[in-house]
Image: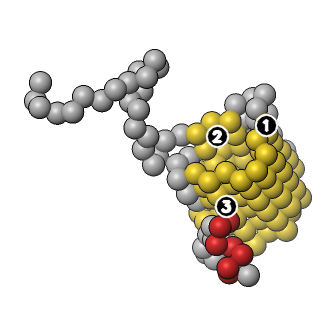
Amino acid sequence: MFGGKKQEKDASGNSGSSSPNANNIINTGTTVEGTITSSGDIRIDGVLVGDLDCKGKVILGPEGRIDGNVICQNAVIEGRFTGKINCAELLNIRETAIVNGDVNTDKLTIQSNAIFNVTCKMGGNGVKSINNKAAAS
């Protein structure tokens, strides 16, 4: 009506263009092996065996599992995590979480009943991308 360009929408009513803040989801029953890089937030209710480099927030749902390395801005862990996590801001461990490995974060909250067996380092060390960590070593 105002001379603007019409956006096409898919069957769910979403426009075809994706924004950098789009949410990504790995649903229950899905297993991903390898490296995932995301500029937006991601929720994992399935299984990730590998590395995750996320510029946003990572949410590991109660039924979710990660075996690998995670680099992110913020994270909420409700499921099983085994590996290394480097979280630039806030790492929130919920009561259903089981976390084993190494943690590097600026701020940390742990709810009662969570299992937290880690080597933990806190402070503002910054986040290094998985793609750049070899160069930093």
- Residue 111 visible: no
Where residue 63 appears, as percent x and y from the top left, is 79, 33
Q: Badge 2 local density, few (<14 within 10 Å), some, or many (20+)? A: some
Q: Tell me which residue sits at (46%, 20%) in the image.
A: 12
Between 2 and 99, which is closer to the camera in this rendering?
2
> Residue beneath label 1, please?
31
Give the Cα separation between the discs numbered 3 and 1: 19 Å
Tag 3's secondary structure?
strand
The image shows residue 103, relative to residue 113, as above or below, that is below
| Callout 2 amino acid | Arg
Tag 1's secondary structure?
strand
- Quarter occupied by residue 13: top left
Between 32 and 72, which is closer to the camera in this rendering?
32
Quadrant in which the C terminus appears: bottom right
The image shows residue 45, relative to residue 107, as above or below, that is above
Q: Tell me which residue sits at (79%, 62%) in the image.
A: 84
Q: Badge 3 local density, few (<14 within 10 Å), some, or many (20+)? A: many
Where residue 117 appears, as percent x and y from the top left, is 89, 58
Disc on res. 43 = 2
Closer to the N terminus: mark 2 or mark 3? 2
- Quarter occupied by residue 44: top right
- Quarter occupied by residue 79: top right
Q: Is residue 11 left or right of residue 124?
A: left
> Residue beneath label 3, please?
71
Q: Is residue 66 left or right of residue 133?
A: right
- Residue 115 visible: yes
Where residue 95 appears, as percent x and y from the top left, is 78, 42
| Callout 3 amino acid | Ile
* Viewer-side label of 2, 1: 1
Q: Look at the image and name its color scheme.
A: secondary structure
Q: Residue furthest top?
A: 11
Quadrant in which the N terminus appears: top left
